[in-house]
Image (spheres, grey):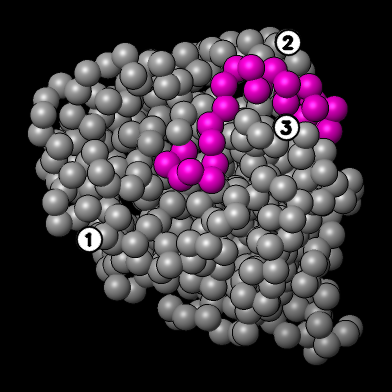
Amino acid sequence: MSGSSRVFRSRRVVTPTGVHPADIHADDGIITHVGMYGSGGVGVHVEDVGEAMLLPGLVDTHVHLNDPGRSDWEGFESGTLAAAAGGVTTLVDMPLNSIPATITPDALEEKRAAANGRCHVDVAFWGGMVPSNVDELRPLAHAGVLGFKCFLVPSGVPEFEHVGEAELRRALPVLAELGLPLLVHAELPEAINAVQPISSDVRSYSRYLSTRPAAAEIEAVEMLINLVRTTGAVVHIVHISAAESITLLRAARMQGLPITAETCPHYLHFASEDVPSGATEYKCAPPIRDNANRERLWDALGRGQLHLVASDHSPCPPELKQRETGNFDKAWGGIASLQLGLSVMWTGARARGFEISDVVRWMGAGPAQLAGLDGLKGEIAAGFHADIVAFDPDAKWTVNPAALHHRHAVTPYAAEQLTGRVLKTWLRAELIYEDGSAVLPRRGRTLMREGAPWISRS
């Protein structure tokens, strides 16, 4: 066998058929087969992790790396190292918060140039849809984006304007023709503008929550379902926060409509009742809702009514979080969590009777399918990239923000008690993370799509 051959061995390998002892055989970074435990060949390097679990590298399809232009918020180097530390081996970068926004082919090339040689894990890109670039959707698709993202409310940055129903009616037939999904931040501004805050205390989380009512999300979901019905386009709703939306989505799926949805670790871990006054590190949009809503999201996830979990990692410099004033009105809305998602999800899933296979499906196979990477990423099976994570499911630890690899240490998970820890991460069979730090020089590739199949750009 060639010098690039590797065997990964564990008593607990998480595969699409279950968790069992196995040897994972890989050659030139690709899994050739999953064999019986102890079946590794003579003279082949064997990585035996014993009782630790071997999981597929996770896929996070909702990450704001902000590079180029706002790399002081996050960047390719810090963000992808945080991903590797969290067992995520493939990211899909969102088109906004970088300057320029990824709304033209030229901007996409700037994004790729900024990423080149700086990524610890593989990175692909969503294109953006804004009012001015409907004519750019086909060129962006041909340039290799996986699909498109839009906002129905102001995004928070001037380079990425939100769209309305009129723009969607122009764009969705184009995306249906291209066969690419539209990812939508689903809140309608009319529902938000119609409410009055319940108090004048800008440090109150309940006040902030009252300004982003569930009705804004529910009405947006209703509109999107109608547009999918009339256009046949594939729509994916990002970061579902309101459990009431799920009833609408379930009915649409039963009618055969191509509409899917995700939620995020912070909606499944936190509850609005527990957010302290002035704790602006919890601010995100849509907001974290109450405990009853959280449990309904877990139930929907378990029933397959939500299709995946993605981080919506959206950090910023500490001063933009307004921690000194605690002003929710002025604070940037985004949660830093990329390195923590797997442990957060396993902590909550285990407590509710779910299996590690469920978490892997929500954070591996599901996102890979959305991104068009199914068959290459998100599972331990023949033909897939040998992106592998050694994971101790029983390790209990406390989040220390200073030990995170994110650009900034501000996170609502500070001091949270979690279960399950990443021990090592391999990308295409090469060890890239171990014992809290990177192992190899940056080996991540930028992925693009030219029709089919997937190719990479180094």
331 is higher (above) or lower (below) than 87: above
Mark 2 surroundings: few (<14), some (14-19) or many (≥20) residues within 10 A: few
Which amino acid is tagged 1? Answer: Ala
Mark 3 surroundings: few (<14), some (14-19) or many (≥20) residues within 10 A: some
In the image: residue 107, left or right of residue 411: right
Of the residues under marks 1 and 3, which one precedes in the sequence? 3
Magenta span contains residue 304: no
Q: Residue at label 2?
A: 230
User: Visible in this render: residue 86?
Assistant: no
Front residue of 166/82: it is 166
Measuring from the top left, give residue 393's x and y in whole percent: 43, 60
Q: Which residues are magenta?
A: 155-179
Which amino acid is tagged 3? Answer: Val
Q: Residue at label 1?
A: 415
> Which SS class for mark 3?
helix
8 is higher (above) or lower (below) than 60: below
Front residue of 35/6: it is 6
175 is higher (above) or lower (below) than 433: above
Measuring from the top left, give residue 452's x and y in whole percent: 89, 48
Marks 1/2: CA–CA distance? 48 Å
On residue 243, the disc is none
Q: Quadrant of residue 212?
A: top left
In the image: residue 287, left or right of residue 345: left
40 is higher (above) or lower (below) than 171: below
Q: Residue at label 3?
A: 134
Measuring from the top left, give residue 243's x and y in whole percent: 41, 22
